[in-house]
Image: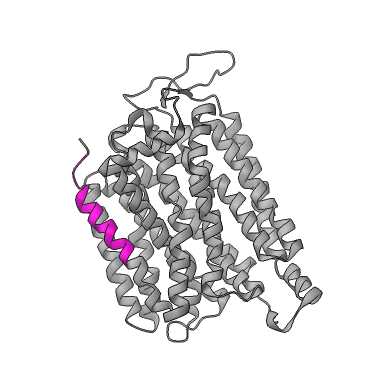
């Protein structure tokens, strides 16, 4: 699929015209796509706040609590390629509206989840929510790359991802106040039957209200995007089976990039999911759940700052070399945090967020170089790889249950090592 300007018509009087070579000159559309990055980034980061809440309510182990991430990121495995097919059928803007409405449904499903008092129903609601986010992300990544000069795609995608990080910085702070601030002093282990169900319903009320508010906001955004649906016209140039997109994995640069997306998302999510409990440890910062939750924005805020810096730096520096440097930095910080105690251990782990900053957009754009009209298919395959967020966090949680949180950080460190190697491999532009 490629994007071109539509011919003027009475049905679409505001369609984009005057295209640059291989790109669409549409600053207003870039703003809308950036808003989408902000929204799905912020909602995804709320998982880091929900995990300690549900862990307390349902008396879960770390591995069980990480099923929140498994349910959420499993959607990327199951929905990404169908989402790419939807893009081919309906176009980018209409598909974005579909994704936003699916996110709205997922948010509203928290109402029956709370009423049921069952952990499995919460997981189902998270899956539906993530399915909508998957659709929006399959649209957003290639679209922001196509809306402008292809030579600055690395920088533009990194800039858009900065607003994704802005969402991941703002949402956890507010969520920690609304959700973790209400953690009860009652021990759920002392309750059973109807009393336990009533307790869980009461304690998840704040979670429900948070997501109902998000549902209202998402409905408004979906309406705005739908009104802009005719701003661009999509050309359908590949009508075969969407599963042929996996042929792209035969290309070493793309295949290795998809693997690195798998590892990066898994490592980033695993660390983010454990940060609250990590900072609550007496040998680290010894914080309460709410206070530790308010530190999560420092993790995601580091990515925010780094992406704004990276959007400029990537205009002048080799993206592959920059990727290798930040991956090495993440390894150093994790290793230092795991082998020390006190405030330095906590802040070293929080600083990994700064290293994460340019990883996703840089890996994505390095892997996607040269895909041309198959950009939407490539985005679908890469979004499938985001399922790393469903698999690596539970494995990290299992290590934490068996050997402690510090030891569990070894797995994310190994993920960053592979990313470092890919940065070195892809340091030269694709032929």
> Magenta-highlighted stretch: main secondary structure?
helix
Give x and y (percent) for residue 50: 59, 65
Position above or below: 215 against 395: above
Q: Residue furthest bottom?
A: 282
Q: Is residue 427 left or right of residue 241?
A: left
Q: Position of residue 266 (x, y in %)?
A: 42, 60
Total numbered labels: 0
Pick the quarter of the image with the C terminus: top left
Is residue 424 shown in magenta? yes
> In this figure, which colouring scheme has been used for the structure?
one colour
Q: Nearer the viewer, residue 284 or 75?
A: 75
Q: Is residue 272 among the parts visible in the rendering?
A: no
143 w.r.t. 75: above or below: above
Give residue 216's position: percent from left, percent from top: 68, 47
Q: Is residue 47 magenta?
A: no
> What residue span does the magenta drawing correspond to?
414-429
Task: Classify 282 as above or below 354.
Answer: below
Of residues 196 and 319, the one nearer the viewer is: 196
> Is residue 207 among the parts visible in the rendering?
yes
Residue shown at 48% from the left, 39% from the top = 81
Q: Residue at the location (43% across, 56% down)?
A: 388
Question: Which quadrant holds residue 326?
Answer: bottom left
Q: Residue 144, image x and y in percent?
A: 41, 37
Q: Is residue 241 left or right of residue 345?
A: right
Residue, x 27% and y 47% (percent of image)?
Answer: 314
Which sits in the foreground, 374 or 230?
374
Q: In the rendered view, tell whether residue 146 sits above or below residue 362.
A: above
């Amino acid at each position: 699929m490629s994007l071109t300007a539509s011919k003027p018509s009475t049905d679409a009087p505001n369609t984009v015209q005057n295209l640059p070579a291989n790109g669409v000159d549409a600053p207003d559309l870039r703003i809308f796509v950036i808003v989408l990055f902000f929204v799905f980034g912020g909602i995804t980061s709320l998982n880091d706040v929900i995990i300690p809440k549900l862990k307390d309510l349902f008396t879960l182990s770390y591995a069980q609590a990480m099923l929140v991430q498994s349910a959420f990121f499993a959607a990327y495995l199951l929905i990404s390629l169908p989402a790419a097919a939807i893009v081919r059928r309906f176009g980018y803007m209409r598909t974005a509206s579909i994704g936003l409405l699916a996110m709205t449904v997922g948010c509203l499903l928290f109402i029956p989840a709370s009423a049921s008092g069952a952990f499995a129903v919460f997981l189902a609601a998270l899956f539906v929510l993530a399915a909508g986010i998957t659709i929006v992300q399959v649209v957003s990544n290639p679209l922001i790359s196509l809306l402008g000069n292809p030579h600055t795609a690395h920088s533009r995608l990194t800039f858009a991802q900065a607003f994704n990080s802005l969402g991941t910085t703002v949402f956890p702070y507010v969520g920690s106040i609304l959700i973790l601030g209400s953690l009860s002093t009652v021990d759920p282990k002392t309750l059973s039957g109807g009393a336990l169900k009533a307790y869980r319903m009461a304690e998840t009320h704040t979670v429900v209200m948070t997501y109902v508010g998000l549902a209202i906001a998402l409905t408004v955004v979906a309406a705005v995007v739908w009104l802009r649906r005719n701003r661009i016209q999509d050309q359908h140039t590949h009508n075969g089976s969407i599963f042929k997109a996996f042929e792209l994995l035969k290309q070493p640069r793309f295949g290795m990039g998809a693997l690195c997306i798998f590892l990066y998302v898994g490592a980033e999510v695993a660390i983010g999911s454990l940060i609250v409990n990590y900072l609550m440890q007496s040998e680290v910062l010894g914080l309460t759940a709410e206070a530790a939750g308010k530190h999560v924005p420092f993790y995601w805020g580091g990515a925010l700052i780094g992406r704004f810096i990276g959007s400029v730096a990537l205009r002048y520096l080799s993206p592959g070399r920059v990727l290798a440097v930040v991956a090495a930095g993440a390894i150093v910080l994790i290793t230092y945090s795991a082998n020390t105690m006190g405030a330095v251990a906590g802040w070293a782990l929080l600083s990994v967020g700064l290293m994460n900053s340019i990883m996703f957009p840089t890996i994505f754009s390095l892997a996607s170089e040269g895909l041309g009209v198959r950009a939407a298919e490539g985005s679908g395959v890469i979004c499938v790889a985001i399922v790393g967020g469903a698999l690596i966090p539970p494995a990290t949680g299992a290590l934490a249950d068996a050997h402690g949180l510090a030891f569990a950080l070894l797995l994310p460190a190994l993920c960053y090592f592979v990313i470092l190697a890919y940065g070195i491999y892809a340091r030269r532009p694709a032929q």
